[in-house]
Each structure stands twice: as structure tokens, then as C-alpha cells.
Amino acid sequence: MSTSTTPVATTSTTGRARTTGPGPAAMLALEVRDEMRMIRREPAALFFSVLMPVMFYTLFVSLFGNQFPSGGSRPVGTLMLATFGTYGAIVATMMNPGISLATARENGWFEAIRVSPVPVGVHLAAKVLATVPFVAGILVAMTTASAALGVLEVSVGEWFALVAALVVGSQSFALVGLVVGALASPNAATAILNAIIMPAAVASGLWFPLESMPDWVSTVARVLPTYHLAELAATPLGGGPWMTHLVVLVAFTGLAGLAAAAAWRRADA
């Protein structure tokens, strides 16, 4: 009796093991790994979303990094980690998911995902989370450049706080990339995202101080999430109160999430 029941139990257990796939966390990890590989295989994407922001930062620091703002105790090159770091973070988080999604749509990815065991939400979340290592890499490269140019004055704790603010805060901008990627072709997505990023960078004071621009630019800046992300990142470097900036970014994340969901429904219709 026992001899005949043991194989049945083993077979049943094996059957359950075979039908039980990886959990959501394992699926997400695999999808993130694949997304990172896709980004690394695109030299143009790496240049524009990773190398170019670092090159811009290095150029501006070499020109103005040794100066000190009025009443400030840190060189401008250190303070630029918050502003140019914000620029680099939003470029990486908007361009990579947006262009990746637009390319996947053009290649028939929607048809494949309908029969895939991986939920759509996991696919999209992976496109967002895959940007985290690249954002961190951009900030490490900028920090290395500022140290090499002799303008880095920041403690380890302050640096980690700045990086955490930019890595976490920039993820909401990936939702904007997904909105564009869900509705536009790859070429159009690239143009649209650049048309969003460049004016926002200038109007938010990411490249040039707002004090050197017309007053109306400062007024516009205060309604832009890019400005609030830069101000939040600057808080560890001696910036002002951070709560308002955090509230604005949380509200922006909610709106961007709703827009991304609506864009996905339209694209998948």
C-alpha cells in the first residue's frame, strides 16, 4: 500500500512544482535585468542619456566650478551636483523607458505580451526600475569629475542624501517617459521627450542660476517638478525647507501615474 501511494504523492508534488512559476519579485528582477541589457546594447541611448549629462556637468564645472555664490560656503561645482544631477536623472529616467516602450510597440511587443505569463505591470515597472543603476552611475561620474577638478566639498552623509533624493525622486519622471512611449513612435518619442526635457532644464535653473534670468522664468520654475526635484536634492547641501518640494513631487507622481495608465489603456485598445 505504502509503496503504491508514494509515487502518486511525488508525482503530485512534482506537478505542482512545475505549474508554479516564479513569484512577482523574481519576475520583476528578471525583467529589470533584461531591460538593463537592452539599454546597454544601445550606444546612442547611453551617449545621450548618460554620457552627455556628465559631459555638460564637467564642462560647466571647469568653467564656473571654483566660484562661490553670494554668501555661500561651498563652491558652485559642488552645488551643481544637485542641479546638473537633476538634469542627468530626468534624462535617464524619461528617455530610456520612453524610447524602449515605443520601440517595443513598433516591434510587435503588445502582441507578445498578451500571451506572456509576466503581467503587463511587471513589464512596465521593470522599464522604470532599470533606470536606477544608470541614474546612480551618472551621479557617481559627476562626483568623480568634481573631485578631480578640486571643487567637491560634501560629506559622505550629505552625498548619500543627495543621491537618494535624485534616485527616488526621478522615478516619477519615468512615468512621463512611459506616457510618450505608449503613444508615439520611437523617432517621435525621442523628439517629444527632448522637447520636454530641454526647456524644463533651462526654465528650472538646472543649467543657469534663476537669478541670472528674467523674473518670469523664476515664476515658471516654481510650478515645474524639475525645479522642485533640484531643490529637494540641494537640501543636504544647505538648501532651504524640503517639505514643499516633496509634496509637489508626490502630487506630480500621482498625476503622472494617472496619465501613464490612461496612455496605456489607449495604446492597448
Image (cartoon, rainbow, N blue to C red):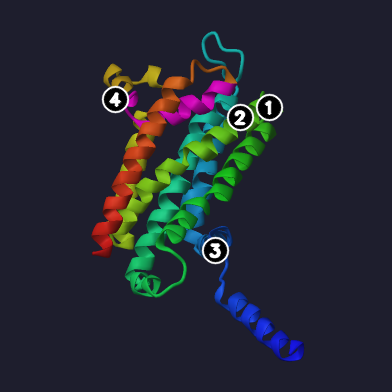
Q: How many marks?
A: 4
Q: Secondary structure at mark 3?
A: helix
Q: Secondary structure at mark 1?
A: helix
Residue topped by disc 1: 157
Question: Image quarter for residue 208?
Answer: top left
Q: What residue sits 63% from the left and 41% below the top?
A: 140
Q: Is residue 82 above or below residue 263?
A: above
Task: State the separation of the CA atoms marked 4 and 2.
Answer: 27 Å
Task: State the separation of the CA atoms marked 1 and 4.
Answer: 32 Å
Residue topped by disc 2: 161
Residue topped by disc 3: 27
Q: Report the side of 101 relative to 142 (left or right).
A: left
Where does the magenta region start and end?
220-236
Task: Please report contact status of discs 1 and 2: CB closer than 8 Å, yes or no.
Answer: yes
Q: Amino acid at mark 1?
A: Gly
Q: Which of disc 4 and disc 3 is earlier in sequence?
A: 3
Q: What residue sits 69% from the left and 25% below the top?
A: 155
